[in-house]
Image (cartoon, rainbow, N blue to C red):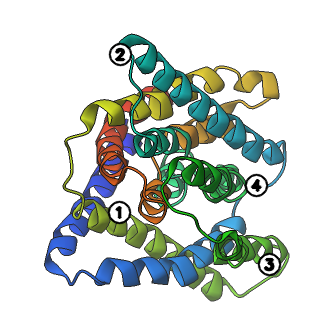
Amino acid sequence: MINLLELYVKLVGLVLVGVILGRKLPVTFPTRLGQFLFWVGVPISIVSFLRQTDLSGQIWIAPVIAYLAIFLGAFLAWLGIKGQAYLTNSLPEPSTQGSLILAAMVGNTGYLGFPITLAMVGKEYFAWALFYDLLGSLFGAYGLGVLLAVRFGNTVHNYGHLAKAILINPALWSFGFGLLFRQVTIPTVWEFCLDKLAWSAVALSLILIGMRLSRLNSWYKLKPAGTSIIIKMLLVPLILGSTLPVFGITGGAAQVIVLQMAMPPAFATLVLAETFDLDRDLAVTALAMGAMVLLVTLPMWLWLF
């Protein structure tokens, strides 16, 4: 409980700092901070934490679970849409359907998932969260997510630049470099500095989330957003989490996987909504609602698993 309280103080505190700064600083600042984290901060964190994590066991099954969670979330959202159509004899607009499905399938397993799993489970199991995010959520969002956005959106885009965006993602390259760099011995002072830089990037990522939340002011689509949240943060983790022992995943590894599955909708859902002209208001509402629901569901998952 002490660890959970400490996490809440740090999590809520840093996000609130971000909310305050987001309202005081220029509109362009969050974008620049996000670019810094994307190109520098997150890659440094990945390299540093990979040096301290355990890569033994069935770690490669983490992205498999991620894809199962993505597909299950999308399927349940599709069932919900069809069920609504059956009861009301009307379907939501295609753009709304697209945002609802995206919010139910892709979670914020990086900027939010990493600090939470590090704080609650420790560095030993960080690789499980890393593999889940980089080899699962990333391609789920910008692979399957893009296909769905094109299907339900009102615009047509060149797939070339989207593929390029994935391939040049510095997190993927730092992941590969970090695996090799694990074998290199460096002076203790360098190791210490690398660790401090990594944790600083984690803190900045939480502040960035607060900055982005400070810009979200649309709340009138609570009902459809609530449907996505229930699927993404309750049903999917509960259903798949109960099957983890079948895959041989128990203990700290199981906690990490469940926490990653239970993360709120990713900011990628808003990026895709804006890019492909989906329901932006629904995406915004789902992001804000999910961030608040997490404070309630987090202790539940730690208790259950």
Which mark identifies residue 54?
4
In 3D space, how far apart are the residues under numbered discs 1 and 2 (Cα atoms)?
Answer: 37 Å
Q: Give whichever of 73, 220 is nearer the camera.
A: 220
**Residue 13, above or below 97:** below
Q: What residue type is disc 4 on?
A: Asp
Q: What residue type is disc 1 on?
A: Ile
In 3D space, how far apart are the residues under numbered discs 1 and 3 (Cα atoms)?
Answer: 29 Å
Which mark identifies residue 88?
2
- Mark 3: few/some/many CA within 10 Å (<14, 14-19, 20+): some
Pointer 2 or 3: first along the chain: 2
Q: How many marks?
A: 4
In 3D space, how far apart are the residues under numbered discs 3 and 4 (Cα atoms)?
Answer: 14 Å
Mark 1 — residue?
A: 209
In 3D space, how far apart are the residues under numbered discs 4 and 2 (Cα atoms)?
Answer: 51 Å
Helix, strand, or loop for circle 1? helix
Pointer 1 or 4: first along the chain: 4
Helix, strand, or loop for circle 2? helix
Q: What residue type is disc 2 on?
A: Thr
- Mark 1: few/some/many CA within 10 Å (<14, 14-19, 20+): many
Q: Is residue 220 toward the left or the right of residue 10 in the image?
A: left
Q: Residue at x 63, y 59 (%)?
A: 142
Q: Which mark is nearer the camera, 1 or 3?
A: 1
Q: Is residue 136 toward the left or the right of residue 226 in the image?
A: right
Q: What residue type is disc 3 on?
A: Phe
Helix, strand, or loop for circle 3? helix
In 3D space, how far apart are the residues under numbered discs 2 and 3 (Cα atoms)?
Answer: 57 Å
Q: Is residue 264 toward the left or the right of residue 49 in the image?
A: left
Pointer 1 or 3: first along the chain: 3
